[in-house]
């Protein structure tokens, strides 16, 4: 009998075709509307595989409804939308898509840094609104990037890729990580420092850590107070790592010069969110991996992960590998 799969958003045809070749597939057809919770609750009851996005909350309540579920393939690097512990308890494999979006997300992070530093969005709006009347020495002046100090909080794949870009701008690069990466220090000329030192010395602080209970509000009121008044905070990791209320206060009071955010604690962010009222913040709708080639590669990797799991193999990017060990599957 062919496995049954539910896909929570329309995916590229090539990826869809590969799943349909081996499985009976049903897919939520709307690209701009998340699958409603009641639909997901209904569909998960009888499927063997779930292909989902970060927009879906796969919690214990939902997993309790799943009678045959063997695998959840998340088309993302992060998987904080999934209760992995509950899935593991039920013998459900959880997979993600690391690696393929590293360079694209690093590109976006540096682009966001540059746009924030040089007030690109603000300047474009200034021109379009008819406010440009003359040239003036200090009109729309921003911060220099070349030769400045970047602090990277979390030196994973994307953090290292970002450091390479910073080196192209002759930046001094500091990093803070749970463990030192001496090889990366030698290769890229990085300096390891503790978080308070990184915050106080950096002109640009780039948040690159995964979201977890330990990193929730990692950058809060006290941490923001350590930063230079001329500093810029960039977050392309996950919402919830930066305390948004504390960030709003720091930006409004001028204790922090500017910020660039691609992620928010609640997504989609509401248009009346206080941060969106400030002129010294550049905001994006979680597009870190949004290049055509990368999104296609992500969809294909999520497909490969799902099919491996449903055909009895250990997926290459299996988050909860203990599920395989428990059921004595060969890896």
Image: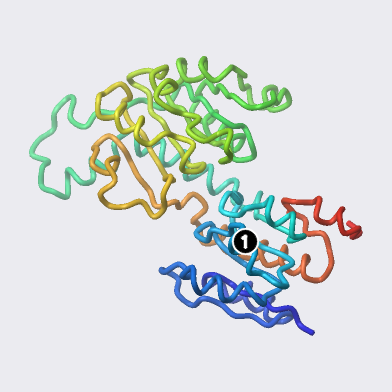
Quadrant (top left/top right/bottom left/bottom right) for the N terminus: bottom right
- How would you rate the neighbour count of disc 1 (Cα within 10 Å): few for under 14, some for 14-19, many for 20 or more? some
- Which is nearer the eye, 144 or 278? 278
x and y, in percent, of residue 279 in the image:
23, 37
In-image side of 252 versus 32 (left or right): left
Specify how the rendered protein is coloured.
rainbow
Residue 248 lies in quadrant: top left
Residue 34 lies in quadrant: bottom left
- Which is nearer the eye, 42 or 97? 42
171 over 57 or under it: above or below: above
20 over 264 or under it: above or below: below
Residue 48 lies in quadrant: bottom right
Residue at screen point 50% across, 43% down: 238
Quadrant (top left/top right/bottom left/bottom right) for the C terminus: bottom right
x and y, in percent, of residue 101 in the image:
59, 51
- Outermost left residue: 133
Q: How many marks?
A: 1
Residue at screen point 54% across, 36% down: 208
Residue annotated with mark 1: 297
Residue at screen point 43% across, 35% down: 234
x and y, in percent, of residue 88 in the image:
74, 54
1 over 253 or under it: above or below: below
Describe the element under mark 1 as helix, strand or loop. Answer: helix
156 over 18 or under it: above or below: above
x and y, in percent, of residue 313 in the image:
84, 64
Residue at screen point 63% across, 27% down: 177
């Amino acid at each position: 009998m062919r496995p049954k799969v539910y896909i929570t958003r329309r995916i590229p045809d090539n990826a869809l075709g590969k799943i349909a070749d081996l499985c009976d597939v049903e897919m939520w057809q709307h690209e701009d509307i998340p699958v409603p919770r009641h639909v997901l609750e209904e569909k998960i009851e009888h499927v063997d595989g779930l292909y989902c996005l970060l927009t879906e909350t796969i919690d214990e309540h939902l997993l309790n409804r799943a009678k045959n579920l063997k695998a959840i393939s998340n088309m993302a690097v992060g998987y904080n939308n999934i209760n992995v512990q509950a899935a593991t308890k039920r013998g459900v494999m959880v997979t993600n898509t690391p690696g393929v979006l590293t360079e694209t997300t690093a590109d976006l992070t540096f682009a966001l840094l540059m746009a924030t530093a040089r007030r690109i969005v603000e300047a474009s709006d200034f021109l379009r609104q008819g406010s440009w009347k003359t040239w003036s020495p200090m009109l729309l002046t921003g911060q220099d990037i070349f030769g400045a100090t970047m602090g990277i909080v979390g030196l994973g794949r994307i953090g290292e890729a970002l450091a390479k870009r910073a080196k192209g701008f002759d930046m001094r690069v500091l990093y803070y990580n749970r463990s030192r990466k001496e090889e990366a220090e030698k290769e890229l000329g990085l300096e390891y420092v503790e978080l308070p030192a990184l915050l106080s010395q950096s002109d640009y602080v780039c948040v690159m850590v995964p979201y977890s209970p330990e990193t929730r509000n990692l950058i809060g009121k006290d941490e923001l107070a350590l930063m230079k008044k001329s500093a810029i905070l960039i977050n392309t990791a996950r919402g919830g790592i930066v305390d948004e209320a504390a960030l709003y206060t720091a930006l409004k009071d001028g204790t922090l010069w500017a910020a660039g955010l691609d992620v928010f604690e609640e997504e989609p962010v509401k248009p009346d969110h206080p941060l969106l009222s400030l002129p010294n913040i550049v905001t994006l709708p979680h597009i870190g991996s949004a290049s055509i080639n990368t999104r296609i590669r992500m969809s294909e990797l999520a497909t490969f992960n799902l099919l491996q799991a449903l055909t009895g193999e250990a997926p290459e990017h299996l988050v909860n590998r203990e599920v395989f060990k428990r059921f004595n599957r060969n890896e």
